[in-house]
Amino acid sequence: PSYPKIAGQHKDYLFVALKSYKTENLSTWGRSNGVMGGIAKQYSNNELKALSAYVGSLDTELKTVPQSKFR
C-alpha cells in the first residue's frame, strides 16, 4: 500500500486532521477512516497536539511556498 508523507506538514493542519478522526456521525467535517478513528480516539487532544508538533518538526522534502493572494 501507499501511505501519505506527513512529516513536515504544518502542526495545526495535522492536529485538526487527527482530531477530526475522533468525530463520529458528522459527515460535514469528520473523517471516516475506521483504522485512524480507532487510533485517534485513544489520545487526548493535548496528546494529539504534541504528536502533531513532533511530526511537523520532522525533516522532509515537503516545501511550503507562501502565496501572496492568501496574505
Image: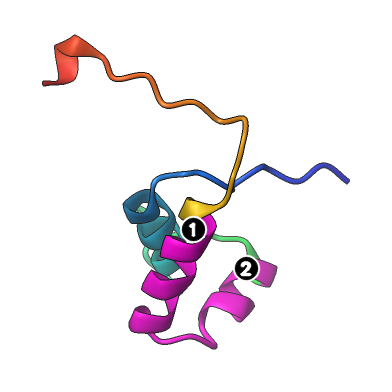
Q: Which mark is residue 31?
A: 1
10 Å crowding of disc 2: few (<14), some (14-19), many (20+): some
The reply to whether the magenta stretch includes residue 50 is yes
Horizontal and vertical percent for residue 68?
18, 11
Give the residue drawn at x 41%, y 26%. Answer: 64
**Closer to the camera in the image, 54 or 4:** 54
Q: Which residues are magenta?
A: 35-55
The reply to whether the magenta stretch includes residue 14 is no
The secondary structure that most of the magenta stretch takes on is: helix
Q: As shown in the figure, which amino acid type bears the numbered disc 1?
A: Arg
Horizontal and vertical percent for residue 43?
48, 85
| 41 shown above or below 6 | below
Q: As shown in the figure, which amino acid type bears the numbered disc 2?
A: Met
Spatial CA span between label 1 and label 2: 9 Å
Residue 41 visible, this angle = yes
How many discs appear? 2
Q: Which mark is residue 36?
A: 2
Q: Quadrant of residue 11?
A: bottom left
| 20 shown above or below 65 | below
Q: Are marks 1 and 2 in contact (CB under 8 Å)?
A: yes
Residue furthest to the right in view is 1
Residue 27 visible, this angle = no
Q: Earlier in the sequence, mark 1 or mark 2?
A: 1
How does the figure colour the protein chain or chains?
rainbow
Horizontal and vertical percent for residue 59?
59, 44
Give the residue drawn at x 37%, y 64%. Answer: 26
Horizontal and vertical percent for residue 21?
49, 67
Give the residue drawn at x 51%, y 44%. Answer: 8
